[in-house]
Amino acid sequence: MKAKETHNIPLFSVVIPLYNKENFIQSCIKSVLNQTFEDFEILIIDDGSTDSSVTKLKQIEDDRICLLQQKNQGVSTARNEGIKKANGKFIAFLDADDEWYPNFLANIFEMIKTYPNHLVFATNYEVEIAPNRFRNTQFSFPLSQKKIHIIGDFFEASRKDAILLTIATVIKKKAFEFEGYFNEDLKAGEDTDLFIRLGLEYSIAFHTEIAAKYNLQSENNLSKMPYFEDRLEVLRTYAEVEHETLQQYLHLNLFHIGIRAKLAGNKAFEIAKKEIDFRYLTKKQKRLFNLPAFALRALKQIQKILAKTGVYVSTS
């Protein structure tokens, strides 16, 4: 652990917000230290943790690790603090309960060398749906034998799984000067908001090799909890933008919010139902959306049981 320094400028600054992740933080940090590409610094922004997260973190000794501490202000504020304090030219994000595989930064570096004028880079990832059970991503464009794709339309490419996931995305620091930072007024949906802004302005260099693990099962993960009103507000912000694939993307997100709200018995379901344009949904999605809550809960339980066997049933 070291104090913040400004010499030996790294290529990458890895920004990790931390709040009560004592069971995950060491594995997360080790996944960064195990990268085959080693030109990076790690900025961990502790957002007022009340458990043993910081103690566990301090057990790892490496000069590239820098701990910044603040009172609890939320994940957006933590990430923004990391971006502003970063020395690197490129900002890589990782959540404290997720992990990279050793090839992540090497794959990003390969794309930077190949496409030096690009500002947004991402890699494929997999989702841990149950302990040691994974599902691969499904994108709405074919993954050919090419390792690198240039994605001109983020919204079209993300009709199934999103090609930009925070933990698998790297952004050139100057892009934040152009497009702004994470919205600190949002408790959830801040990543969707940022990615919409980036998707409207830039093409994305995307590496097809799986290089990150998204942990869907971890506890106390604010970025994976509902906060339906904030998520709805993000979508409303762009509702009047004349962009066909963006509109499709917004209504698919409304579908997912509506399903989760119905499962939770939250009034956001009725709001989503009024705002959604069902022309953008598949027949399967329309049927699911109109199922009674008890039937959705039964299907959710079946989905969880199947997940433990390594089988994932999607809503696409």
Image (spheres, rainbow, N blue to C red):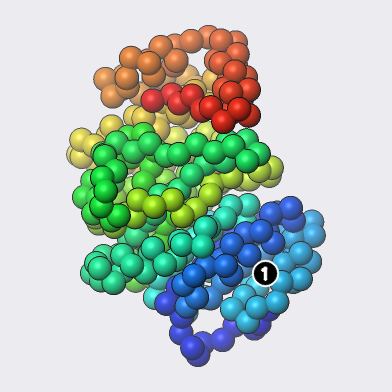
* Towards the viewer: 131 or 231: 131
Image quarter in which the N terminus is found: bottom right
Q: Amino acid at mark 1?
A: Gln
**In the image, 90: left or right of 47?**
left
Q: Is 191 rendered above or below residue 227?
A: below
Q: Secondary structure at mark 1?
A: strand
Task: Identify the image quadrant of residue 159.
Answer: top left
Image spot of residue 88 (x, y percent)? 44, 77
Taking the view exactly as shown, the residue that stands out farthest to the front is: 145
Image spot of residue 160 (x, y percent)? 36, 34
Image spot of residue 52 (x, y percent)? 79, 60
Q: Which residue is mark 1?
A: 69
Task: Identify the image quadrant of residue 26.
Answer: bottom right
| Res. 239 in view | no
Number of marks: 1
Q: Is 206 rendered above or below residue 267?
A: below
Image quarter in which the C terminus is found: top left
Residue at image point 39% right, 52% down: 209
For label 1, count other residues whose C-alpha is less than 10 Å away and answer few (under 14), some (14-19) or many (20+): some
Residue at image point 37% right, 56% down: 122
Residue at image point 70% right, 77% down: 61
Q: Is 282 rendered above or below residue 208?
A: above
Image spot of residue 63 (x, y percent)? 63, 82
* Towards the viewer: 295 or 138: 138
